[in-house]
Amino acid sequence: MEKIPEKNKEIIIKNDSIDMANCPTCSTKVRIEAKNLTIKYGKEFGVKNVSVPIHDKNVTALIGPSGCGKTTFLRCLNRMHDLNKKVSISGQVLLDGQDIYDSKVNPVNIRRKIGMVFQKPTPFPTMSIYDNVVAGLKLVGIRNKSLLNEVCEKALTQAALFDEVKDRLKSPGGSLSGGQQQRLSIARALAIEPEVILMDEPTSSLDPKSTLKIEDLIFELKKNYSIVIVTHNLPQAARVSDCSIFMYLGELIEYGKTEKLFKNPSDKRTEEYITGKFG
Amino acid sequence: MANNLGNIINKKPIHIIYRWLGDKIFLSLSFILGLTIVLLAIAMGFVLYSESGETFKTFGVWGFIKGTDWDAGLHMSFGALPFIFGTLVTSIFSLLIAFLPSIAIAIFIAEYAPKWLSNITDNLINLIAAIPSVVVGIWGIFVFAPWMRDTFYMPIFLWTAENYPTLLPIIGSPIGYGMTTATIILALMIIPYITVLTKDAIKKVPQEQREAAYALGATKWEVIRMAILPYARGGIMAGAMLSFGRAIGETMAVAMLIGNKNSFPFSIVGPASTIPSVIINEFREAVSNIHVSSLMALGLILFVISLIVNLIAAYITRKLSITGGKVI
Ligand SMILES: Nc1ncnc2c1ncn2[C@@H]1O[C@H](COP(=O)(O)OP(=O)(O)OP(=O)(O)O)[C@@H](O)[C@H]1O
Ligand SMILES: [Mg+2]
């Protein structure tokens, strides 16, 4: 723990070498930008001094061995850490140039703009499938039945679930299988049409077929949204993402175009991880 | 090391017999204990029933239940309806009074209060729950009932006497001891129970459920409304029913405060009686067989009511609990 400052300096220098605003590999504008982001659980580091851009209309994959801080980083992007008093955050997260940790910013608005899909499916078990999907819309006061129906069908279709549940939209969300519940959670996140979607291993509980459907969906969504996806499935990262971030022990090791990062990584640790030597 | 462990594990014969025996002993023991408790309850019900025989023979089961007379002096005629009525009215209303405040307190403790404050409140509530009901009763007799009489009952009574004298029988005599006082005291006594059980149910809601709601852009209150309370509803309802059961059976404080009037008509603030209060008041003076038998029959009715409440509680809990087995 004592030596970390030394290490951090190294990282700062390294991160500064990335041209943030104009990533040479991505043409779209920067949607989110993390600047010198350090996240601590009490005294322990979750993420150490990470600076990285997230581009619009683009899929960014977050990869790295278990415990390297992927979830910690992801949750920081829509202020989910606000719920845990032990967590302290330094640095900035800019959404379209504005710091989302600014005291004037209401986290509720941030979370409406930056949706999240969790690793574990989390349908509201007492609500029907239908109510689960439109839960976020009802929060903002939308009561128009035909609009809700329309959004519900669209979101469920996008999440590749509609055909399976269209005859039982009124049955409880908890009555679905694990994989179906996950797709329901995805549909629920899509229904509020966020601008950025964060996904934490969204397909880890799905079968290959629904996994493919979700990957197709991600491909579809990136036309309009900016997506960050954490995954342990490297082929998946290679398939769906445009840019990749490799993290290790809380630090950002390498960031760049997915193709380059997978075929020709510049850091030895990235190469070792991608070739399966650890993690 | 590994070899050693292997050796230990491989000494099967002793182990298997040991484990088999242990299993058997434990199983039979818990079976016997469980059975004993069930048999005890059945035996209790049976004793109450057989002791009530004379009453049921004289008045008929239904006749006793719907009988409105309770006269142990002259006519030796006994009916349970006033007490059943008093018991149900006081406990239902105390539950209605206590329910929402308890939920609010529980939400405050579990979700809003900072740690130190929720600790203090927690301890305070446990403390209140631990006050013996006779102490509550004596406080009620000397402080609460006179205060209620002077502040509410008397003015209301006088106002009604002036403006709507025909309504006076419904209001009842404002002596301070009666149905309303007992109901409020009962409500105060069950608030800690509902609060604690609700708080536990809220604390059991998985963090993921909260986060899922937050991630949809819910505010704190919206998270409570859409994720926490629905998930905890089984536990909350079970808590309410258990507290209701407690209110039904509460004896001492009610007997001290309800005024003990054994026959209809009851009035809103005037004296009344409940099953437990009449039993505790009369078991010493009950000399004739039919009187004792009638008190036993009241006991049986209370037993059955409690049983029904518990069954309903179990049913509600099962109906409302979250499938997936994580909640009660
Ligand atoms: N709530 C928490 N309290 C304390 N420490 C935590 C907490 N959550 C994570 N950590 C720690 O922070 C570090 C990063 O955890 P994180 O969950 O971000 O890893 P991850 O990369 O998402 O791993 P995985 O791939 O297994 O999901 C780990 O060392 C972990 O022990
Ligand atoms: Mg994780």
Image (tube, rainbow, N blue to C red):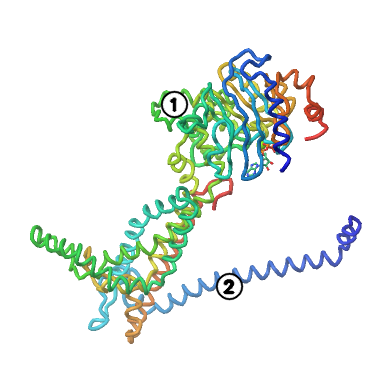
At mark 2, the secondary structure is helix
Label 2: chain letter: B
Looking at the rendered image, the quarter that the N terminus of chain A falls into is: top right
At mark 1, the secondary structure is helix
Compared to residue A106, the image places residue B227 above or below, namely: below
Q: Residue at x 47, y 50 (%)?
A: B114
Looking at the rendered image, the quarter that the C terminus of chain A falls into is: top right
Q: Which residue lies under the disc numbered 1?
A: A148
> Which residue is outermost to the left?
B162
Instruction: Report whether residue A135 is seen.
Output: no
> Which residue is outermost to the top?
A27
Q: Is residue B175 left or right of residue B249?
A: left
Q: Which residue lies under the disc numbered 2?
A: B36
Compared to residue B276, the image places residue A68 above or below, namely: above
Ligand 1, by image quadrant, is top right
- Amino acid carrying label 1: it is Leu
| Percent x, y of residue B66 | 29, 67
Foreground pick, B254 / A50: A50
Compared to residue A131, the image places residue B104 above or below, namely: below
| Percent x, y of residue B144 | 28, 68
Instruction: Report whether residue B249 is seen.
Output: yes
